[in-house]
Image: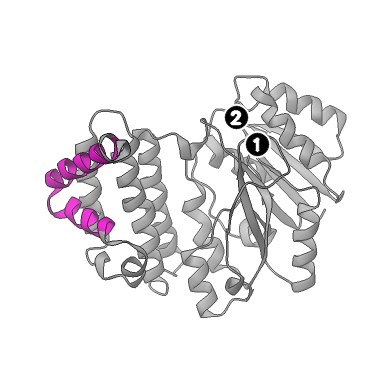
Amino acid sequence: MKLSVIVPVYNMASDDRLSYTMDCLLHQTIRDFEIVAVDDCSTDASGQILQELQRQHPDLVKVYRTPRNLHQGGAKNLGLLHASGDFIAFIDADDWVVPDYFERLLNRAEATGADVVGTDYSLVYEHTMTPGRVVHNNQPSQAGVLDEDRLRSLMLDFGSLCVKIFRREIILDCPSRFPEGIFYEDNALARTWVSRMHRFEYIPEPLYFYYQHSDSTVHTVTRQRLEDRLTSARIMLKEARHYGYFDRFRPELEYSFLVLFYKNTLFSCMRQMREKGKYTFIRGLGREMSRTFPDFEKNPYYRERTNEEEQHFLHLCIHAPLRFYVSYQLLWWLRDHWYGKS
């Protein structure tokens, strides 16, 4: 078996989202593969759809169900337990790929001996095979045998796991599994997988379609989801220390933690979280950031990639959280209510 495609599924029956994704997978140009679909205790018709597809395509579709809702991490772990392919891929149950997606990635892996092959994706708002706004998930300079520079680059900018195929040993010969019961589970393990890779290849074309809708994780900001992001970032550092690559890649890990744990979480909270306790949350966020990496403002990637306004507010949140809270709220009120009218 060349490939196992793991599809975590939770309540994706509406608007033909799950059916469209599965139909796309069933019509791939390769046949030596399996679709490992994991129903994460859906409460809609997703389970019935998967069971019917398994009945119609027993040679291609394998369906499993989690014992309770474990979120994508738990569903992926169950999928990994049953995956038999030489390579492993993940695809979200509401996304889709071009018909020869897996054939092209597998051919590149077999031609080069790569452990991982990635590509780009496009953002779309309807079921279509016409690319929307293209997101370059990697860089051509990252491709090839992984010397120190390429490893550092991938530690910093590995991109989404969904737009890649992985040689099974990279994942399954490693004891770590996805954290269960939280969102942002990919961030916890990605760098451990990078540390195990020897060659990476990249096809710079938008072959994966990332469906944009209001239920997407990135479009839903609650305190719990922000807490999940913090948990994932903490696990990322724990993984690096456990497997012995923390000191080797400290600047890259520091910056990655800074972005995931602090910068993105802070600004998402301030702009989009509607629940009470926002000030308490951001004050605790700043305190933990300064304890974990007290000198993060000296990080070379931070200085290069963070604009002056962001640097100002990130500094202020740690050293004067109340002043930050008031001034940032005022700034965004002015931008929404004053500048937007001019």
Q: Which mark is residue 93?
A: 1
- Where residue 231 appears, as percent x and y from the top left, is 38, 46
Which residue occupies the foreground of this view, 129 or 259? Answer: 129
Q: Seen from this angle, which residue lies furthest top?
A: 44
Q: Which mark is residue 220?
A: none
Magenta-highlighted residues: 309-336
Of the residues shown, which amino acid type is indicated by label 1? Ala
Residue topped by disc 2: 10
Q: Is residue 217 left or right of residue 290?
A: right
Q: Quadrant of residue 239?
A: bottom left
Q: Is residue 337 above or below residue 34?
A: above
Of the residues shown, which amino acid type is indicated by label 2? Tyr
Q: Nearest to the eye among marks 1 and 2: give it.
A: 1
Pointer 1 with pointer 2, Cβ within 8 A: yes
Please tell me whether mark 1 sits on a helix, a strand or a loop.
loop
Q: Residues within 10 Å of mark 2 (few under 14, many from 20)?
A: many
Residue 69 colored magenta? no
Residue at 51 percent of width and 78 percent of height: 149
Q: Residues within 10 Å of mark 1 (few under 14, many from 20)?
A: many
